[in-house]
Image: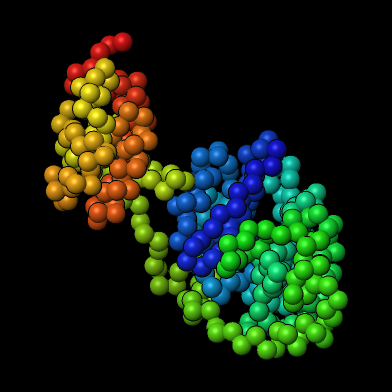
Amino acid sequence: MLIFRQLFDQESSTYTYLLGDGSSGEAVIIDPVFEQIERDTALLRELGLTLRCVLDTHCHADHVTSAWLLKQRSGAAIGISAHSGVDGADRYLAQGDRVAFGERYLEVRETPGHTDGCVTYVLDDESMAFTGDALMIRSCGRTDFQQGDPARLYRSVWTQILSLPEQTRLYPAHDYNGLTMTSVGEEKRFNPRLGGDIAERDFVGYMANLGLPHPRKIDLALPANLKCGRPADGSMPEAAPSWAPLRYTFAGIWEIEPQSLEEIGDAVQVVDVREADEFDGPLGHIEGARLIPLGTLSERLDEIDRERPVVAVCRAGGRSAHATVVLKRAGISAVANLAGGMLRWRAQGHPVVGGTDA
């Protein structure tokens, strides 16, 4: 079974793609974004996948890749085009190369024109292709900088992408209109730049008159991406909180395990967001916990010490997860959710006040 996830970075309008082989648990990731490192590693962990290769479709100018960071965390190899000019990769890919993950693989097709080092990754059964900026949904990558060449891009798209079966689904690196995918058949008929009866000369004239501004992150992104995303100034994404051993979830929540919460004790304040009858009910509550039901949390923020980290607790971890969002919106940043709530706390034998043995 193929595991497939399409992820999105709002700031740069970048799509990141995760593909995994369900049998072996091996995975690849395409066009990851520096600031999304916690999200992507959380998803890999939750799906039980081992990252084998980090791939970029080209040297991006609008965001910084997290290829180097993912390699540091997972040991995965970094792959990019041999014509990209990038230093520090493990695999420099060329036409016809295969990137394997378990029993599946991606075939490399060189699609220069937006940059010299653009490639498209085609899934082994040709059901999906990841086109980077070479071909986008009813659009294509610009050709006015970074070795851009409209004639070359036109030939790349028609010989390497639109030559695939019409039903092949195409996934670009970016979309600015909320669109998620297209197909070879659609783009051959409806792409206003490349489709229909548009000839190479028509396309070259179109691209010469776009008049687009340069990407606003180009001065930051290009130098970093030429080093696989390794920051030249040593700057890193926001570090994981250090006040406790926390784990980030794909849902965007920092969590703490019951054992860790018991070990740090009075260093944090526990806020129980259940109702009063639950707080004093069969599951009991954690000693020292402050009862603030979720429905009243926003009006009772002044009862929380903003100088101490907060752990939110409920029955199973759902309401308390939402409570962490409420607290962060209120400016309380050192917040975590008790993983599994009171159900897991009691099941693991941690002490409670009240409650029953049933």
Q: Nearer the viewer, residue 172 or 209?
A: 209
Task: Please indicate whether residue 259 sits to the left or right of residue 170 in the image.
Answer: left
Identify the colour scheme used. Answer: rainbow
* Residue 155 x %, y %: 82, 76
Residue 294 visible? The answer is: yes
* Residue that appears at 52% across and 55% down: 70
Vertical position of residue 267 compared to residue 78: above or below = above
Image quarter in which the N terminus is found: top right
* Residue that appears at 74% across and 55% down: 169
Q: Nearer the viewer, residue 36 or 277?
A: 277
* Residue that appears at 17% across and 45% down: 300
Residue 117 visible? The answer is: no
Vertical position of residue 202 compared to residue 194: above or below = below
Give the quadrant of residue 174: bottom right
* Residue 335 x %, y %: 28, 46
Task: Please indicate whether residue 213 sits to the left or right of residue 205 in the image.
Answer: left
Vertical position of residue 163 compared to residue 358: above or below = below
Image quarter in which the C terminus is found: top left
* Residue 91 x %, y %: 67, 61
